[in-house]
Amino acid sequence: MDRFADQTILLIKGFNGKHDDTLWGSRLKSLVYNCGVDILDLEGTSMSFLLEEGFCDVTYDFTAGSREFDACFKIDDIFQSLRNAWIMCCIQRLMGLKVEMTPSVFAYSMLYPYTDNYLDHSSASEAEKNQLNQRFRRRLAGENLIAESLLENRLFRLVGIIEEQYPRRQFPMVYEGLLGIQTAQERSVQQLDKRGGRSSKLSGSDILDISIEKGGCSVLADG
């Protein structure tokens, strides 16, 4: 699996952003096929799903879309986002929906590399992290805030993309799920000390509790 991850990252690095890049698409399908056969031991209809029913198209569309949205988006962040998009593909399949890169799947998958990286970084003070969390929570709750930084601009635009596909009045549970993740995100800041390392104030069980809450909310929002 590590080899597959490394090869995927190398493939993403080689993506040139052109929508007619058939060679890149062929390499992606070859990589997915090798992963399915060698690692997941798949065959038949399962391989058909990976290769023909949207999975590769989602990977291609997401990689192109992330570069278009933010030309400075890092390779590791694209891969982190892709993993969530792939989970959404599986959920679409289980629900009998067309496997595709919808605007909300793209926006939701893009959100958390931005927030995770900022909140985990030691260069931002605790006060700055708390301010971002508070303002992001207000935007998730539906307030039309004016972005005060480049990061906020990107986060607020992504929330706007979700709102376009899922209007708040018709789909309130979408935003309840996002707010649940945000609550867990705010708690996760407690895990770090001022230098970005693990806080000595929390026990192992406290950290486990926070991590499970955040992961569980993410799975709920995926659905």
Image (spheres, rainbow, N blue to C red):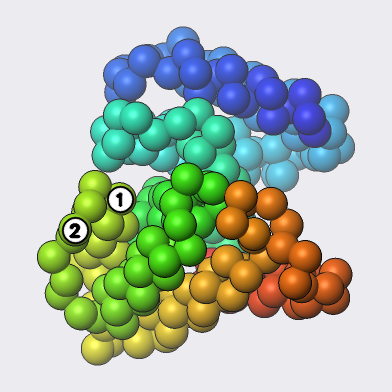
The kind of residue tagged 1 is: Leu
Which mark identifies residue 205? none
Seen at 15% across and 74% down, the residue is 144
The quarter of the picture where residue 95 lies is bottom right
The front one of 152 and 101 is 152
The front one of 217 and 86 is 217
Residue 221 placement, left or right of 64: right
Instruction: Give the residue at mark 2.
Output: 148
Q: Please state the horizontal and vertical placement of residue 136, each as a whole percent of the image.
A: 34, 69
Distance Cα–Cα, label 1 vs label 2? 8 Å
Instruction: Say above or below: 28 vs 111.
Output: above
Seen at 72% across and 63% down, the residue is 199
The quarter in which the C terminus is drawn is bottom right
Instruction: Give the residue at mark 1.
Output: 151
In the rendered image, is residue 217 in sight? Answer: yes
Instruction: Say above or below: 209 vs 107.
Output: below
Secondary structure at badge 1 equals helix
The quarter in which the N terminus is drawn is top right
Q: Please state the horizontal and vertical placement of residue 160, each as a whole percent of the image.
A: 22, 64
In the rendered image, is residue 84 in sight? Answer: no
Seen at 47% across and 45% down, the residue is 123
Q: Please state the horizontal and vertical placement of residue 209, each as a whole percent of the image.
A: 76, 77
Secondary structure at badge 2 equals loop
Instruction: Say above or below: 17 vs 137.
Output: above
Point out the residue furthest to the top here: 23
The kind of residue tagged 2 is: Glu
The front one of 42 and 8 is 8
Q: Number of numbered discs present?
A: 2
